[in-house]
Image (tube, rainbow, N blue to C red):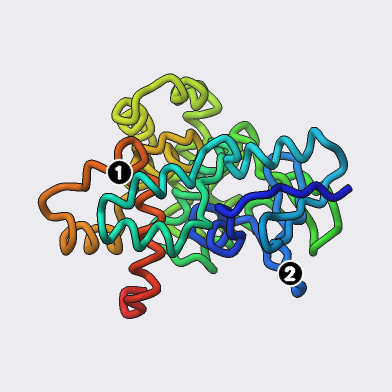
Amino acid sequence: MEYFWKTDCLDLRQTLESGQCFRWCRQDDGSYTGISGKHILRVRQAENGVWFTVDSENEAQFWLRYFDNDTDYASIIKQFSADRILKEASEENRGIRILRQEPFETLISFIISQNNNIPRITGIIGRLCESFGEKLSDEYGGMYTFPSAEILAGLSPEDLAPLRAGFRVRYILDAAQKVHSGEVALEEIRGMSCDEGREYLKKIVGVGDKVADCVLLFAYHKTEAFPSDVWIKRVVAEYYAGGLPECMGGYRGIAQQYLFEYFRKRTPVMK
């Protein structure tokens, strides 16, 4: 069945190619296919919303939540208009939404993302899922689940060598082992503050502030998290050296996405 979601605050390209997720593929017809857990979706842009190709109403509701349908982005953009730069950035990129992703997959994905580019990240994650995940469908070149912490915790560095993940293999295994053992209980982070969650995630070898903030924002929807890479550090140094504007409120993570895309397009030398 096809389910239509009317919204003017979701642009599939802006959202799915923004660097917050790595398992979506743009098809020749412009639609996107992706997987979360055991849920597979084909989604295509419309003039005033998007079309989901799903099997049931329940599946549609799953994906509505994944695309953060409960957050009023129009109101947030209006709030951001108190700052000139942020007003321009948010209005130009109003189609970006913060995805609500599964925590373990998000954790491993952003561990892999360290000192890496999107094509390589996507390749490593693809090989990880094909090697250790469950195949759900032959469609779109094959759709695989993300392997569980239990499966990854039982592997050795040699098992992961074909991924070509380099130094990140040690971090992947440490994360899987700590999550599987319960030393890092991912569900407990939902009840933590942003600062508490950041320090908790940093118990994992190789997880620093940036990776932790990405996990907090993209898996737990803690929108006050503000992942800071070289792009954002330069933006803050040039425009917000005196501090981030008050109009960001509790939505600094959403503001970060708007600012990242806004300045990335204007400063290609920073790629």
Q: Check the picture and name the quadrant holding the C terminus.
A: bottom left
| Residue that carries the numbered disc 1 in the rendered image | 248
| Residue that carries the numbered disc 2 in the rendered image | 27
Q: Amino acid at mark 2?
A: Gln
Extreme residue toward the left, this view: 242
Between disc 1 and disc 2, the foreground one is 1
Q: Amino acid at mark 1?
A: Met
Above or below: residue 188 compared with residue 14? above
On the picture, is 103 further left or further right than 56?
left
On the picture, is 153 further left or further right than 41?
left
Characterize the local packing of mark 2: few (<14), some (14-19) or many (20 or more) Cα atoms within 10 angstroms.
few
Residue 173 screen position, x and y as percent: 50, 41
Viewer-nearest residue: 200 or 24: 24
- How far, Cα to Cα, is label 1 from label 2? 35 Å
Q: Earlier in the sequence, mark 1 or mark 2?
A: 2
**Who's the residue at 59% across and 41% down the image?**
155
Whether residue 164 appears in this view of the structure is no
Q: SS for tag 2? A: loop
